[in-house]
Every structure is written in structure tokens, then in C-alpha cells.
Amino acid sequence: MRVLFGTDGIRGKAHEYPLDPNTMFALGEALAHRLEGGTILMGMDTRESGPEIARALAAGIAAGGGQSVLIGVVPTPAVAYLCRTTDAAAGLSISASHNPYGDNGVKIFGHDGMKLADAIEEEIEDEMRAIRRAEVRISDAPLFDSPELIESYESFLLSAVKPDALRGRNVVLDTGNGAAYRIGPEAFRRAGASVTVINDQPNGTNINEQSGALHPQRLAEIVVERGADFGVAFDGDADRAIFADDKGKIRDGDEIIYLWAQKFRREGKLRGDCVVTTVMSNFGFERQLTEDGIELCRANVGDKYVLELMLARGAMLGGEQSGHIIDLTVHTTGDGIHTALVFGELLAEESKPFSQLATFSPMPQILLNRKVSSKPPLDSLPRYQEELAKASRELDGRGRILVRYSGTENLVRVMVEGDDDALIRRIAEALAAVLVSEIGA
């Protein structure tokens, strides 16, 4: 059973187990053993703890007979892309995505540019426990970027859209003081856009701080102030993107996937008339796709599970409401910058502003996050089960309830959908209150 690995790699508090130097050394060594040597690429976001983790991983990789190459500060999807286009055996992205700067983590990609299957992560975890030492030697030598690898990734991003696809477009980017702070604006400028950038001064501790994909409100205001065509907010490792339209309305991943699906259908790329999302996607989205003759297939939360279902169904487009979007025509993982560039090209091909593009009527949805001290099976919580039964009777088939634990944080997420705003809010708050009383932090 996996303990260290969650839905998106290993995460925790920087400098503490399992992100302490000894455990990261063991991870690097175990991975090198599994790959029987070979080159392992490493990229990281802008957290101050990134270099410490990179050095520990590199030392472990060397002890296991492998070689590490640091790409530099790059989005997580850059690691995935470079894994499959070089002779690298694997890649590591050192990031905690949207989490605060005090957290960090490691995501692992295979040579195919895809995240490792759960079973492989479990095997690596087993070896880490067996080989972890109390004392390890880790160099404090300076770390150096690989500019040629960074340029290769930028060129890939631009290859997905027509030359000067965004010429004449006015775009606002919020890089969240994270991994996209240089590459994102540069890619948009090279695609011809006029770019305004906010939150692009990382200092090691301000990543995601009231900025980026979790806090797009200021982005939306600036889009309106500047008369921009649209705005995009990236999360810390830039594998997802949240948009603001020309009127300042926040548009989530469901809406972008819907517009992208229509584009793919026009271009004959929507294989099997199928789009893959997660259990979190809005029911209004599913209802509209069904009316359009497109099937929506739901995976568990986590872009690796979206990708697994896409491959199983032969789908070319999938993603999450949170802004991870996977375009299998060119990529193997969610990529916020790629998503934003392709959307910019899509918008340039339309005769209407973003705010006037037809999408779908979302069903009212409430999502509450609450901190927990532990994550026992939900069906083992009697008071919660009693409240859930009561809530289901109140909804009476006119909505749905989804309660799950976060795979990356000590949180329980309560999502309720229905056609009555007041009812679903009351239900969500009641469920959340019971959970806090039973397992709250």
C-alpha cells in the first residue's frame, strides 16, 4: 500500500519527512536502481526548498548508478515533454503545485512522459524503506540550469499554434510567482501577443501567495482595466490554467474543455466523440455535451487518472475543472501554457469576444474544503453517514453529493450540486460541520 505517494507524487512540509534529505536521497537511489542507471531529468518551481531537494535527489541518483541533469525552474509539463523527447529514462518535477511555499513535493515521469502507475510507485516506496540511511552525504555545490532544454520546451509550446497566432491579442498573465514566471510571458510574446504580466517576481516564499490559479480575482480586474481579450492564471508548477474573459468573469476548466471539444470536433480530432473529465466536473457540462452528441467519461480526481481513462477510451481531450487539460494530440500531461496558447488561437479564429462564446449553463455547485486530522474511511463515520442519508433525501434525485479526501493535503472536500442554491449550500455546510466534529484538525 502506498503511504508516501498520493494522487500526484510525494508531498509534505519542506525539510521534514518525507521531504527530508535522507528520504529524498533514498527516492533518488531507488529510482536509479529501478531504471538500472540512465539519465534522470529534474525541474523545479520557485520554492526556496527546491535546491535542497534537488541536491538530495541528485546524490541518491548518483549512489544508485544514475546521472541527474537539472533543467532549471520550469513547469512540470516541461519535465514530461523533455522525458519523451530526449534519452532520459525518467524525470522529476520538484513542486507542490498550488500549495503554499512551505510545502514541496516530487512528481515522477517515465520516459514516455507519463506519471508512474500506482503499482510502480508502491514498489519504489517499498525499496525506499529498505535502503533509507540515517546519514547520507549530499553536496552543496551550485546548481546550474540547462538553457538548451528550456529552449526546446519553449519551441514545443510554440509549435502547437500557428506562427503569430496571437498577433494583435492583448493578454494578461498571472504567473503566481511560480514556474511559469519566465517561460509563460516569453512564449506569449513569441506567439505575437501583447502581454501584461503580474506576480512574476518570485522570491522563494511568495509562490501562489494571493496569486495564480487559486486567486484569479486581481487578474480578472486587470483584464477589464486593460481592455484585454482574456487573462490566464497559472498555478505554482504551471500544469493548469484558469481564465478570465474580457468582462472579468472567471472561467474554469470545464468551460475551456467544452470550447476545445467543439474546436476538435470541427477539426476531426475528437476521437470517439468522447471527452474525459473527473467526478468533480459540473453536471451542466455533462448535460450540454450529451445534447451535442459528445460523451463525457468521468475519472477519479487527478490528471494521471484522467490520462489513464483517455488512453483506455481512445480520447484525445480530457482534463479537470481545476484547469488541468490534457491534449493528447501533442502532450501527455496537463500544461497550463499550452492550454493558454491554444485557447488564444481558438479565440483568434472566432468572430466574437470570449464573453460571447456559448458554452453551457452550469448547475449550481458548492465546494467546501475542511482540514482534517486523519482520513478514516468515510463509511466508518456514523454521524456523517446519518447526515449524508438525510441530505440525499432532501435532494431527492435533483442533484448529487461528492465527498472525498484530498490526495495532496489533509483536507476533506464536500461538493454538492443541485438546482436550488440555498438547499445545496445548507446541505454542504451541514455535511462539512459533521465531518469537522468527527475528524477535524
Image (tube, rainbow, N blue to C red):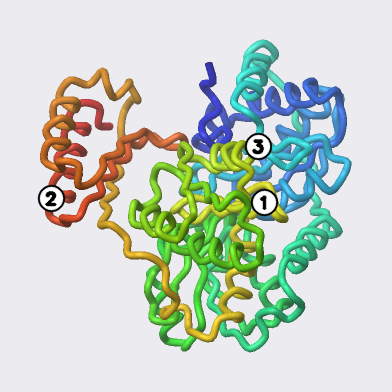
Relative horizontal placement of residue 148, taking residue 262 as reference (left or right): right
- Inspect this view and state whether residue 73 appears: no
What amino acid is found at the position of numbered circle 3 in the picture? Lys
Q: Which mark is residue 115?
A: 3
On the image, numbered disc 2 is attached to which residue? Answer: 423
Q: As drawn, which residue projects farthest toward the top?
A: 130
Which amino acid, by three-letter code, is at mark 2? Leu
The amino acid beneath tag 1 is Leu
The mark closer to the camera, 3 or 1, is: 1
Q: Position of residue 336 (x, y in %)?
A: 59, 59
Front residue of 218 and 145? 218
Element class at badge 3: loop
Name the residue: 79% across, 54% down.
145
Q: CA distance from mark 3 to mark 1?
A: 14 Å
Structural crowding at the residue carrying mark 2, measured as other residues with C-alpha within 10 Å and reported as few (<14), some (14–19) or many (≥20): some
Q: What residue did someone put label 1 on? A: 328
At a point 57% along the width and 84% down the height, the residue shown is 170
